Image (cartoon, grey):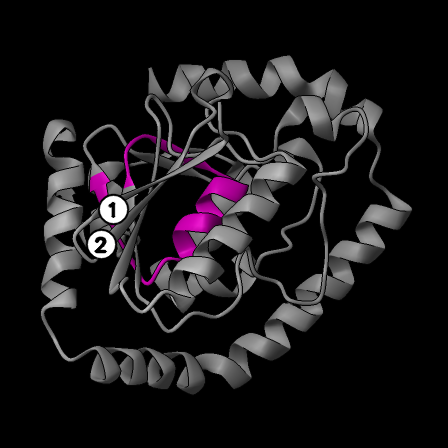
Amino acid sequence: MSELTVERQDDVAIVTLNRPERRNALTASLMVSIAETLSGLDADQAVGAIVLTGHDPAFCSGLDLSELSTSATNLRIDETGRPWPRLTTPVIGAINGPAVTGGLELVLHCDFAIASERAAFADTHSRVGVMPGWGLSMLLPQAVGLRRAKQMSFTGNYVLAEQALQWGLVNRVVRHEALLDEAVQTAKDICSNDRDAVATLLTLYDDNAADQIASGLQREWTLAREWRDRVFSPETVGARRSGIRERGRDQIS
């Protein structure tokens, strides 16, 4: 079974993280597939918008802790600071369930997000014992404000869907059963506009934020590399796994 599936509805591509038995946790191979798939869809002239979602019950639980606590090959820290390259095709997050740590970073790299009532968001980097490498330290305060971002990162506690809406992390909260239809319809609204105009506007938005984000990403990448080389231990992650999962279940059950 593929870790990532792609479905077409006219000129909308629906990309689904497809490891439901592992709550769509990120392996090294899945991370590569996400980047390659979105890049390929961006190059496809028949695609006008992309919807990124997860196979229930979760959107993405972050790095696969089994892999992280053994080979740690999914602890990818590179200078791009992105889960996928910059695109000219809009990406809408359809957040169907918990989006945690690396999963939260996927949400932050979407151009905007629509959430199911079952969605929940948490930054557990400090609980796991890793540093963000996909720009969370820049993108989360940009989305929710600096103080709220610090609260999320320092506590590791979950923010539920309605609070995420109030904070500006998502644009809309809808019934779980209606989520994909709502996201696809929004994507079709985008596709109904002039493609070149949409692509240029997307580039303008990204370029206008690029200088500030680029310097922040460089600092985050440098710190994350130093942290990994000096502090990170797969064995420590392994020892914390059960506690991390139990605390998450308690907060969103």
Q: Observer-nearest residue: 46 or 84?
A: 46
Residue 127 coordinates in the image, percent (x, y): 63, 32
- The label on residue 12 is 2
Type of amino acid at the residue the image marks with label 1: Arg
How many marks the image carries: the answer is: 2
User: What secondary structure is found at the residue carrying circle 1?
Assistant: strand
The image quarter in which residue 147 lies: bottom left
- Asked if the stretch drawn in magenta spans residue 77, the answer is no
Residue 238 coordinates in the image, percent (x, y): 75, 19
Type of amino acid at the residue the image marks with label 2: Val
How far is disc 2 from disc 1 in space, using C-alphas?
A: 6 Å
Q: Observer-nearest residue: 51 or 77?
A: 51
Label 2 CA crowd tier, 10 Å (few <14, some 14–19, many 20+): many
Which residue in the structure is indicated by mark 1?
8
For the point 69% across and 21% down, the residue is 66
Locate residue 154 relative to residue 208 in the image: left or right: right
For the point 21% across and 77% down, the residue is 195
Locate residue 237 relative to residue 39 in the image: left or right: right
Q: Give the range drawn in magenta.
A: 95-115
- The label on residue 115 is none
Which quarter of the image is occupied by the C terminus?
top left
Q: Do the residues labelled 2 and 1 touch (CB within 8 Å)?
A: yes
